[in-house]
Image: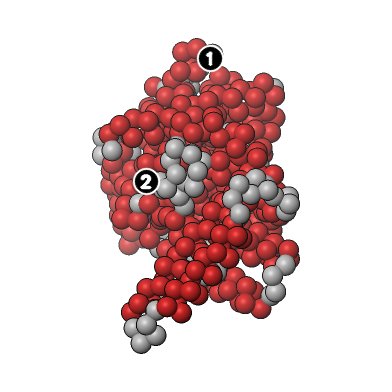
Amino acid sequence: MAGSETKSGSKQFSEALDRIFTHRIWGFPVFFAFLWIMFAGTFRLGAYPMHWLETGVSFLSDVLSAAMPDSILKDLLIGGIISGIGGVIVFLPNILLLFFFISVMEDTGYMARAVYLMDKVMHRIGLHGRSFIPMIMGFGCNVPAILATRSIENRDSRLITILINPFFSCSARLPVYVLLISAFFPGHSGTMLFLIYLIGVALGVITALVLKRTLFRAEHTPYEKYLPPYRIPTVRKTLRSMWANGVSYLKKISGVILVATIVIWALGYFPRNISYSVDYDGKIAGLKKAHEVALAQADASDDGAIRSLSEEYDRSIRQLTLQRNAEMHEKSYIGRIGKWIEPALRPLGFDWKMGISLLTGISAKEIVVSTMGVLYQADADPKGPSSSTLIDRLHSQVYTTGPRAGEKVFTPLVAFAFMVFILIYFPCIGTIATISKVSGSWRWGAFTVFYSTFLAWVMALLIYQVGSLLV
């Protein structure tokens, strides 16, 4: 009798939760609240281990810098591999936390409630409630999410779900968001990350509506309500899910990202026989001689004057060194490629290094961060601390030539436009291949490449140009 009462009480409790979680009005704010908690937790909880990893990477860089003589190997290890791989690996805690929250929502049974809640929304854009599952899976990785669309029987609904899935930002893009949000929106990290993901969802919905009224005529199939019982997630299963995704991330770092990092470094390191527009060595020698003369003429007992002369000398030498590094990088092979595509990206507020990062991100979005780590490290002051983080280097970047010389390369507006571009443009090669395979035609893969990249360019253009008028 007591057991029956316990079961009855448990059923009543589950029904009470369902009345909230699946309510046609209250269910939505609860759902968005859970999503916001997931994104805020990913940032705030991940900030501590992220800082520890950054400290470790910086320490390793400083140790190698002090222990190794200047050579091509030293530049490869510090300016290439450590800057590239180190810039990506620090975001591992954020990736693990994101999968932790997704796993908890699935294991508790809440994800099934979210699918049921979204069925009517899916119906309004011509999709099935079952389409929501691949969309949520897309937050982890678009490839298995697109494979999951095979369970959608209606062809038009399946194709629409496939084509909008890349808008549901995969975890590979997360390192880019975390980097730029940490650098330029530190006081609103969770809200900004939530906004980026929300923009992706909104674009997916709008695209589905357009596709429904143009290329497809998807018909709605009623969703069969099945709500599994609520469960308390087990630590073992949750940790297993986090471990599997963490290992997958590390394998990608040790494979394709490592190779890409070395290639990017080599393209930026060569050629070495560069003809500079200014005799930097002569200018540095002249400054050194003038500094020695000034010191000889100064009052040796005036510590303040001596310190002021030394600080001015160091500042001038540092400025010339940075200008030389910047010109050397612009005239490297990768600089030439970047300068070639820069005119198309200039209206978006992007410089050529951001353009190169976008190009390399075609193979895997994590490479965007490793590319930025390599490219912006190349302009660092060789006499300065090698432990400066990528965030510090982004803050210090300025245009050295052209009409914007002296202006900051990165601003909050530029960072926001860049994140939106990353969100929308050209899904990774693996996603495009999966779209072609599951849809049954390479044409849909090609269509995804062109329409997503064009939309990314338009969105970033609007954000930067309109934002520049308002700021």
First in residue order: circle 1 vs circle 2: 1
Label disc, if present, on residue 412 of the rendered structure? 2
What residue is rendered at 56% in x and 35% in y? 342
Left or right, 184 with reference to 399:
left
Q: Position of residue 218 (x, y in %)?
A: 50, 17
Q: Is residue 190 visible?
A: no
Q: Amino acid at mark 2?
A: Pro
What residue is rendered at 37% in x and 73% in y? 308
Pointer 1 local density, CA inside 10 Å: few below 14, some 14–19, many at least 20: some
Image height check: is 227 above or below 100? above
Pointer 2 local density, CA inside 10 Å: few below 14, some 14–19, many at least 20: few
Residue beneath label 1, please?
216
| Observer-nearest of 332 and 450 | 332
Q: Position of residue 3 (x, y in %)?
A: 36, 60
What residue is rendered at 66% in x and 78% in y? 67
The quarter of the image holding the C terminus is: top left
Q: Secondary structure at mark 2?
A: helix
Q: Position of residue 295 (x, y in %)?
A: 45, 77
What's the CA distance linking mark 1 and mark 2? 39 Å
